Image (cartoon, rainbow, N blue to C red):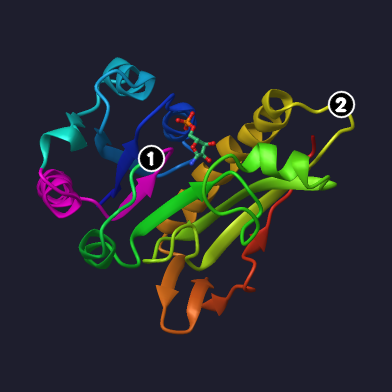
Amino acid sequence: MTHRLAVLISGAGTNLQAILDHITAGELPATVSLVVSNRAAANGVAVARQAGLPVAVIDHREYPDRAAFDAAMIERIDAHGADTVALAGFMRILSPGFVRHYQGRLINIHPSLLPLYPGLNTHARALEAGDAEHGCSLHFVTDQLDGGPLIARASVPVLTNDSVETLSKRVQQQEHRLYPRVLRWRAEGRLQLTDQGVELDGEPLPATGMQIDAPA
Ligand code: GRF
């Protein structure tokens, strides 16, 4: 059976678009069973509808608390089936119950070389710190914000004249390569979270994940 992806978004949906492009190109043997957005106006919702995908807009403001919002998401996601739940710019913190429910199936992309700069404003923080390199990371999600076991990272150089805009664009190009690739490992049954950590083809990955830098 084809690997089913649920993709959770809040914003532009460029990672969702990259995932869909790789599926169309035959480079990612998966189907997107559902796109969930907590924002009706998110551009990613338009991306999903344009692709003819099932979309659930679940507005967190309509729920009394995080647990109730997450329970509503779980109900919708499970109704469509999900072998992997991919967070792609989903801007809500998930409850422990949600994280537990999808343990080992829940993956996030973060715009920094984790463990550097968990949280927000990562590009500005990398520039501020004068870092020579920056990048993005994919990790399994645990209760720790942006702190789960690393799967893969891609780095980019920070250039002298970089602004948040130019740097974030360079990082996003890598996100759009890296996310489909990691999801492909999942779809091919090669990537697991075990008690020992992250395993690819039955072998443990280093604590920093697989380093997959691209030609600029
Ligand atoms: C990406 O930079 C991702 O790393 C972060 O949110 C952004 C989402 O962008 N978590 P998009 O909605 O996929 O364009």
Question: In the rendered view, would you say 197 is above or below 175?
Answer: below
Task: Determine whether 74 is above or below 53 in the image.
Answer: below
Q: Between disc 2 and disc 1, whose residue precedes?
A: 1
Q: Residue at x 50, y 72 (%)?
A: 198
Please name the residue shown 11% across and 40% down the image.
63
The reply, left or right, for residue 129 in relation to residue 92 is right
- Asked which secondary structure carries label 1, the reply is loop
Disc 2 target residue: 161
Q: Secondary structure at mark 2?
A: loop
Residue at the far right in the pictured view: 160
Q: Position of residue 24 (x, y in %)?
A: 43, 29
Residue 212 shown left or right of residue 15 in the figure: right
Q: Which residues are magenta?
A: 64-89
Q: Is residue 128 above or below residue 53?
A: below
- CA–CA distance between discs 2 and 1? 29 Å
Q: Quadrant of residue 127?
A: top right
Q: Tell which of 134 and 1 is nearer to you.
A: 134
- Compared across the picture, whether 183 is left or right of 123 comes to left
Q: Is disc 2's CB within 8 Å of ligand 1?
A: no
Does the beta carbon at disc 1 come under 8 Å from ligand 1?
yes
- As for residue 213 lying within the magenta part, the answer is no
- Which mark is drawn over residue 91? 1
| Residue 214 visible in the current orientation | no
Q: Which residue is situated farthest in the bottom direction here?
A: 196
Residue 23 sits in quarter: top left
Type of amino acid under label 2: Asn
Q: Position of residue 81 (x, y in %)?
A: 17, 49
Dot 2, crowdedness within 10 Å: few (<14), some or many (≥20)? few
